[in-house]
Amino acid sequence: MLVTLADAANPWLSWTYVQNNWEELVAAGKEHIFLTVGAVVLAIALAIPLAMLVRKVPRLSGPVLGLSGILYTIPSLALISLLWPVFGLSPWTVIIALAVYGLLVVLRNIVVGLDEVPSEVLDAANGMGLTTRQIATRVSIPLAMPTILAGIRIATVSTVGMVTIGALVGYGGFGTLILSGFQNNFWHAQIFTATLCCVLLAVVFEILLLLVERLTVPWTRKQAG
């Protein structure tokens, strides 16, 4: 009976909590989106020149991908601790840490996507007199786009979940509410609602990026059909 009464006083599902804390949930959602988008954009910005370097100097492929893989294995708490003295309690601490984890996925997919472009297609483009830049922008990148977008989608969805670790420095989006719920006598409604919002946000990003992929590379849809 005591357990039942305790559960009733501290329910996991509570619409009242949502109504009373709507503004806080919206603010956490905005912060979560900002951190996610910022980290993914930074990861892409870092991955593009690295991928170009690997394509230009193939022997660097192993070291570059290996280094990004090593960075990916650093525990998130340790990485945030390393960035903390430099960037302090700021969103950049979280964004840079998350970008490091997203870098490997995005970089690898860019490299793989470009490597999968058929050599005969590149030879044909070269035979038509296209410049190196034209081949890249008109042939290589469009053909590699499905793989590249898949990498961005995977990195984005995984980043949504990892943003919560930023609660340790005060910038964790829904993670801040989850941590606060644990600290506030294990407040079930706050923990569950924030967790559910995080999952729903990941689903929304997944759907949006799938739509972008279908609109950007429609020929993949035709092939699937």
Image (tube, rainbow, N blue to C red):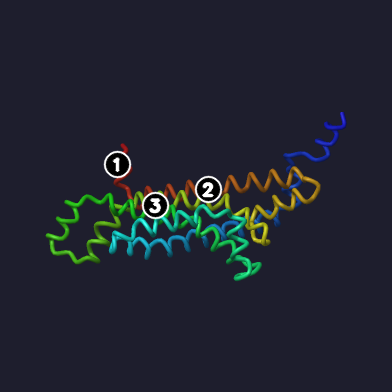
Crowding at label 2, few (<14), some or many (≥20) Cα neighbours within 10 Å? Answer: few
Marks 1 and 2, how far apart at CA? 24 Å
Question: Label 2 is placed on what type of residue?
Answer: Val
Q: Position of residue 153 (x, y in %)?
A: 45, 50
Give the quadrant of residue 25: bottom right
- Is 153 left, or right, of 186 in this rendering? left
Q: Position of residue 93 (x, y in %)?
A: 59, 65
Marks 1 and 3, how far apart at CA? 17 Å
Q: Nearer the viewer, mark 1 or mark 3?
A: 3
Q: Are discs 1 and 3 less than 8 Å apart at CB?
A: no
In which quadrant is the C terminus drawn? top left
Picture residue at 57% right of the left edge, 53% below the top: 75
Give the quadrant of residue 74: bottom right
Residue receiving disc 2: 204
Q: Secondary structure at mark 3?
A: helix
Residue receiving disc 1: 222
Crowding at label 1, few (<14), some or many (≥20) Cα neighbours within 10 Å? Answer: few
Crowding at label 3, few (<14), some or many (≥20) Cα neighbours within 10 Å? Answer: many
